[in-house]
Every structure is written in C-alpha cells, then in structure tokens.
Image (cartoon, rainbow, N blue to C red):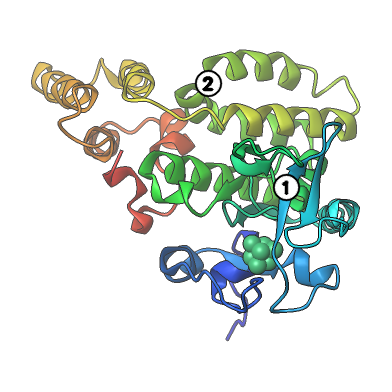
Amino acid sequence: MSNDVEPRPKLGISSCLLGNEVRYDGGHKHNAYIRRTLGEYFDFIPFCPEVAIGLSTPRPPIRLVDDGESVRVLGTEDSSLDYTDKLSGYGDRVSGSMDDYCGYIVKKDSPSCGMERVKIYQGKKEAPPVRRGSGAYTAALMASRPELPVEEEGRLMDPGLRENFVIRVFTLFRWRCMVKEGLTPGSLVEFHTRHKFLIQAHHEATYRQLGPMVARAGSEDLDALAPEYLVCLMQGLRHVTTPGKQANVLMHIMGFIKNQMTPEDKTEMLDLIEMHQSGLVPVIVPITLMNHFLRRYPHEYIEKQYFLEPHPRELMLRNHI
Ligand code: SF4
C-alpha cells in the first residue's frame, strides 16, 4: 500500500487567522472559511511577525506613522519604540525560504501584516489617519516575492477576488510542480499553451507579452527567462476577469468545435454566454455546457485548457461570479 500523499499548495498565513492567540490583545481572528474550506485544499504555514521579532502576547499596540520623511511602525503609547526595520528584515528573511510557497493570506488593517489600505497616522499632526499603508512585514515580503499571490482575509470574502486569488495559487502550484520535475523549453511551451485561455480571460496584454518570451525558450538561458516569465504571468493574473472577457474566451473555444456543433447546440451555447454577460447566470453555467459539448465533440487542445477547470470544482468558486 502506498503512503504517498497528494501534494497540495503550501501557503503562508497570518497566524491569528488560524485561531492562534497571538494578537496584541491576547486574542485571535479565526476565519472559518479560510481554515475549514480552503484548509481542505491548502497546507497553511502560520507566521506572526510581531511575535517573531520578540514582542510579547499580549503587548502594547503599534501603528503606522508618517513622520514626514517615511512611514514607520511605532508604539501607539510610546512612539520612541520603532519596529519598522525589525519587521521589514523579518519579511526579507522569511521570503528567502519561500521557494515552494504558492500564496499567502494576510490579516487586513494590521501595521505588520496588512496588504493595503492600512491606516497611516500623521505624526504629531491632528489630521485623521489616511488609509493608504501596507504592513511593514507584508510590504517586504511582496517586494521580495513579486510572483507570490498575496491576499487579505477581508478581500477573500468577495467572490471575484476570492476566485482570482485561488486561480493564482493553483497556477503557481502547477508551475512549482513543473519546475520540480525539471524545467525544459518544451515544458515551458506546454505550460504556456495550456494556460492560454486562462491568461486571456484575465489580461489579454499579458498574453501578448508572454508569447514572445516563450518563443525565446529554446535559444536563451532558461534560468534567467523562467523568473521573468513567471512574474509577468502572475502579475497579469491579478487582473480580475469579467463576464465580457469570459464570454470572449468561451466564443473563441466554441470556434474550435463549431463545425461539429448542430445549429441547436450553437444557439443553446450562445444563449447561456449571453445570459452570463447579462448577469442572469454565473459563469459555471456556460462553462458546464461547454464541457458537455467537449465531451460530445472531443478536441485535444481545448480539453487541456486550464480555463475550463483552473481549481478544484468542489470549491464552487465559479458559482458566484
Ligand atoms: S502581527 Fe499579523 S499574525 Fe501577528 S497578530 Fe498581528 S495580524 Fe496577526
């Protein structure tokens, strides 16, 4: 009997989101959807940067402050305590060991972990805080790992952003698996080919950028080309898809089997694509019908497209967009 366990995407996560009591007030911010639902498919590795740099639990709160020259992470009660460099340095160090990570979920609003729109206080001024900061730890992590999908737990409650994040995680997971088996010009071309419609459904310009890169695969140093390709791909997938873009891709796919489809098949397919564009049905409806036609009229190139199933269907992410 084999003891092999199916590999799963490994993700970093703000420790408090898993229910660990590491927050400044001694509490946690357990997120049931992340832990129970996403936890079925991902292996989470928890990090608490504030504890990791030596702060106690509980501890006095900290916040982002614009001192006029830069944004610092300072003690709220004692502003002579500056944790900026320690938190950034920890982010740099941790990111160095994330070659096999496929994503990271961070706690919103935190001066250490927040990704965006974290409150920045205005030094000694009485002005209200502005929401345009990033946590010091996460900012360092994202700068060091531009290929890594990072998302906040609050934004994950939005169906479109959630689907986008999970697509990026599984795309990076497929990339990591491919690289583990040995990257070759042929495997890069195959990877790119199978992601063609998925990329187009997110950002056509990125697809046009990636094509010439892949064409250089046989003649250039792959070790230099691969990271360039990966960052461009992962940044492109950050563009959230729309019903219009999905309709374009579905019509394009239909073009490959249109000669086998009956006039009734085509009408049925076009009706559902239009209903999705009008907001009457989620995208899973026309995609399910397309998969039905692909079973009836098999097409090897199309069947391999990750656009048709980019993540486990049990997550039901396309039932809400
Ligand atoms: S530093 Fe991050 S992981 Fe730690 S308690 Fe704050 S938000 Fe949670």
Tell me the residue at 72%/58% (across/down). 76
Asked whether, in this view, residue 250 is left or right of residue 265, the answer is right
**174 vs 32: above or below:** above
Residue sitting at 75 percent across and 19 percent down?
213
Q: Is residue 78 left or right of residue 126?
A: right
| Residue 97 image label | none
Looking at the rendering, in which quadrant would you find the N terminus? Answer: bottom right
CA–CA distance in space, label 2 to label 1: 34 Å
Spot occupied by residue 74 in the image (x, y as percentages of width and height): 80, 54
Residue 88 pos. (x, y %): 85, 51
**What amino acid is found at the position of numbered circle 2 in the picture?**
His
Q: Name the residue under label 1.
A: 64
Between disc 2 and disc 1, the foreground one is: 1
Q: Name the residue under label 2.
A: 203
Please tell me which residue is depicted at 77% across the width and 49% down the height of the picture. 136
Q: Sequence-wise, which precedes: disc 2 or disc 1?
A: 1
Residue 239 in the image: x percent, y percent?
A: 52, 27
User: For the residue marked with disc 1, what is the amino acid?
Assistant: Leu
In this view, the residue in front, 308 or 293, is 308
Quadrant position of residue 161: top left
